[in-house]
């Protein structure tokens, strides 16, 4: 959370810096003062995570909820930054006070682990293996996704976990009639309890990715700015168009998000240029997320880079994606209201 956000929230509440410090002290049992608030607001000191969590929650309470805009983060190429992007976009939205449901639809369970949930540990209360997305997608399942969702951290993000067992659902979905609609069906009414649903997908265009595309309103395509990364995008776009035509006419492409960009490397600069030349006419190309150690370091930390360091390189790019999602959601809500 940036200093400007702290100032905005304080001013929205009509509080002076002294009154704001005293409100925080009451809520969090701390001893902050006017000087401290001032240092947060002018970004000379980082805002503590407990304060970030409290402020995000207070923003959330002042916003109307649902129906959620559903985002699929997809690219069949592996290691391009899908999971890191999905987790950071979800966190930016939650920091802004939105209620987010995160669905890990990748059997690798990287996002589940990134959020600090170990799907292989038994549930602390029941002692039984934790139910995951696998349990919800089985034909005879009666799980609502909300039954499976685990609240993570202080922000308003709930995660539907994955585990390697999810790989077993692929053949099952293939033989279920309308198998690509299973996730959409399971999302059902819980769409009304969130503002955004973010789905992380595996590095292939199998049944799980098709389920994500069928459940989604929009897709974002992270694309690493590395040699050969652009090659598969046409193939992915053809699949997106097929899904749109055959099973999900609502589906739109939010854009391509270049990732792991190193502006000092000729190859990265050339690939970014290829992305713009190849797709920029028809699709939005977001500003690239730079390659930065913090993204690698946070993948097993339980928190996203954008929450740990609001000034990390790439935060602005993820905020731009979040702003595009917020705009898309408002547009769709207006259409629903007019109709
Ligand atoms: N901006 C970045 N800077 C540096 N490293 C990054 C960045 N984004 C992602 N990474 C690292 O790159 C690797 C791949 O990222 P990530 O897991 O998000 O890709 P993915 O597309 O989800 O992979 P998979 O296809 O296996 O699901 C990870 O080790 C991650 O920490
Ligand atoms: Mg991944």
Image: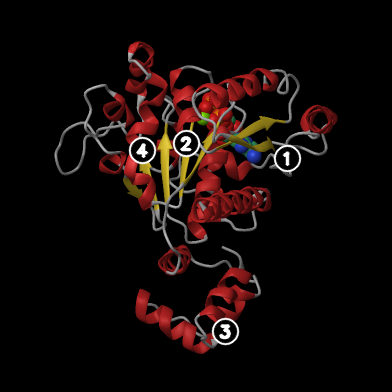
Helix, strand or loop at mark 4: helix
Mark 3 or 1: in front is: 1
Q: Residues within 10 Å of mark 2 (few under 14, many from 20)?
A: many
Nearest to the eye among marks 2 and 3: give it: 2
Q: Is residue 289 above or below residue 27?
A: above
Q: Dot 4 corresponds to which residue?
A: 187
- Residue named by callout 2: 199
> Which residue is painted at 69% across and 42% down in the image?
289
Residue at image location 38% in from the left, 12% down from the top: 174
The disc, 4 or 3, on the residue closer to the chain's N-terminal end is 3
Camera-near label (4 vs 3) is 4
Q: Residue 173 carries which label?
A: none
Res. 199 in view? yes
Please report the residue visible at 44 percent of the width from the left and 18 percent of the height from the top: 207
The residue where tag 3 is placed is 35
User: Residue 226 location, x and y as percent?
Assistant: 74, 26
Q: Where is residue 262 drawn, in percent x and y?
A: 76, 37
Where is 25 relative to 259, above or below? below
Question: Between disc 1 and disc 2, whose residue precedes?
Answer: 2
Query: Whole-Å distance between the Cαs marked 3 and 1?
Result: 42 Å
Mark 4 and mark 3 in contact? Answer it, CB < 8 Å: no
Mark 4 and mark 1 lie on one chain; the one further toward the N terminus is: 4
- The residue at which mark 1 appears reads as 284
Q: Which color mode does the image show?
A: secondary structure
Measuring from the top left, give residue 322's x and y in whole percent: 59, 51
Specify which label sits upstream in the sequence, 3 or 1. Answer: 3
Quadrant (top left, top right, bottom left, bottom right) of the N terminus: bottom right
């Amino acid at each position: 959370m940036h200093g400007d956000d702290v100032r905005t929230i304080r001013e929205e509440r009509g509080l002076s810096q002294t009154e704001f410090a005293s409100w925080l002290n009451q809520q969090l049992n701390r001893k902050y003062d006017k000087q401290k608030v001032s240092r947060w607001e002018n970004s000379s000191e980082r805002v503590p995570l407990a304060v970030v969590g409290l402020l995000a929650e207070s923003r959330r309470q002042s916003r109307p909820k649902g129906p959620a805009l559903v985002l699929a983060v997809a690219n069949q190429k592996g290691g391009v930054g899908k999971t890191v992007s999905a987790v950071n976009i979800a966190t930016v939205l939650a920091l802004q006070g939105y209620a987010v449901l995160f669905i890990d639809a990748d059997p690798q369970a990287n996002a589940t682990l990134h959020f600090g949930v170990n799907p292989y540990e038994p549930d602390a209360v029941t002692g039984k293996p934790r139910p995951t997305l696998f349990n919800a997608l089985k034909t005879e399942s009666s799980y609502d996704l909300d039954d499976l969702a685990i609240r993570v951290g202080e922000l308003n993000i709930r995660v539907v976990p994955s585990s390697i067992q999810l790989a077993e659902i692929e053949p099952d979905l293939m033989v279920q009639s309308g198998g690509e609609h299973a996730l959409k069906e399971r999302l059902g009414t819980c769409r009304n309890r969130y503002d955004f649903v973010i789905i992380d997908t595996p590095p292939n265009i199998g049944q799980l990715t098709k389920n994500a595309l069928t459940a989604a309103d929009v897709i974002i395509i992270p694309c690493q700015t590395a040699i050969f990364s652009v090659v598969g995008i046409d193939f992915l776009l053809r699949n997106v168009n097929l899904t749109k035509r055959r099973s999900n006419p609502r589906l739109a492409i939010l854009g391509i998000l270049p990732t792991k960009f190193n502006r000092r490397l000729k190859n990265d600069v050339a690939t970014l240029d290829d992305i713009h030349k190849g797709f920029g006419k028809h699709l939005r190309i977001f500003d690239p997320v730079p390659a930065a150690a913090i993204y690698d370091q946070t993948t097993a930390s339980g928190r996203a880079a954008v929450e740990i360091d609001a000034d990390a390189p790439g935060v602005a790019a993820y905020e731009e994606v979040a702003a595009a999602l917020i705009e898309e959601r408002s547009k769709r809500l207006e259409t629903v209201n007019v109709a």
